[in-house]
């Protein structure tokens, strides 16, 4: 599958969840029906064929979860849930939030300052000295 098609499919999955869930349900139902018909052709009764197909397929929810976790969009969705959870936690504890923001600001500022000083003193090439008068 091309990268653009994969990206378009993933975005569609992220933004049209209900539609994609319905399509997945229909596809799994179609697979189950086809498996039942195949087993009935081999001589099983409809009830036995349905039971055998369900046992062979496994839990429908487990199959759906496996399908959902196969694409990159599950990672994006998980990241988005983690960000929302983190923001909710920071909103609930404003004192902690202030301490975290100040700590990050001081750490980033100190790191930038130290790097600037070391870059100026040691990392930049020294200008060449012209000793031939």
Image: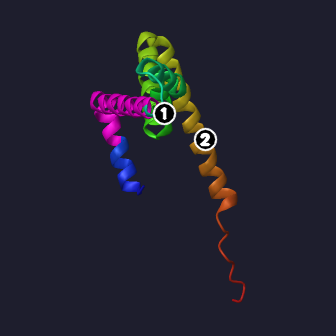
Instruction: Identify residue for label 1.
Output: 42
Let me know if residue 15 is in the magenta part: yes
Left or right: 38 in relation to 121: left
The chosen color scheme is rainbow
x, y percent for residue 29: 36, 28
Question: In the image, what residue occupies the spot 50% across and 38% down?
Answer: 70
Quadrant assignment for the C terminus: bottom right
Q: Pointers 2 and 1 in contact (CB under 8 A)?
A: no
Give the Cα distance between marks 2 and 1.
72 Å
Residue 131 among those drawn in magenta? no
63 and 11: which is toward the camera: 63
The image shows residue 111, relative to residue 29, as above or below, that is below
Dot 2, how many residues are within 10 Å of its Cα: few (below 14), some (14-19), or many (20+)? few
Q: Quadrant of the N terminus?
A: bottom left
Residue 3 rendering spot, x and y as whole percentages: 41, 55
Q: Which residues are magenta?
A: 11-40
Q: Residues within 10 Å of mark 1 (few under 14, many from 20)?
A: few
Overall secondary structure of the magenta section? helix
Q: Is residue 102 above or below residue 15?
A: above
Residue 98 got which mark?
Answer: none
Give whichever of discs 2 and 1 has the lower sequence position: 1
Residue ID at (34%, 35%): 14
Towards the viewer: 31 or 46: 46
* x and y percentages locating residue 131 in the rendered image: 72, 84
Residue position for label 2: 111
Q: Which of the two residues, 60 or 123, is positioned nearer the viewer here?
A: 60
């Amino acid at each position: 599958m091309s990268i653009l098609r994969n990206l378009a499919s993933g975005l569609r999955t992220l933004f049209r969840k209900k539609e994609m869930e319905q399509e997945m349900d229909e596809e799994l139902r179609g697979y189950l029906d086809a498996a039942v018909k195949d087993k009935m052709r081999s001589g099983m009764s409809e009830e036995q064929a349905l039971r055998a197909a369900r046992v062979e397929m496994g839990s429908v929810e487990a199959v759906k979860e496996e399908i959902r976790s196969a694409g990159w969009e599950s990672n994006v969705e998980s990241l988005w849930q983690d960000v929302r959870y983190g923001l909710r936690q920071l909103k609930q504890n404003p004192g902690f939030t202030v301490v975290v923001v100040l700590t990050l600001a001081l750490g980033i500022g100190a790191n930038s300052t130290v790097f600037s000083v070391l870059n100026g003193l040691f990392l930049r090439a020294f200008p060449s000295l012209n000793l031939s008068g």
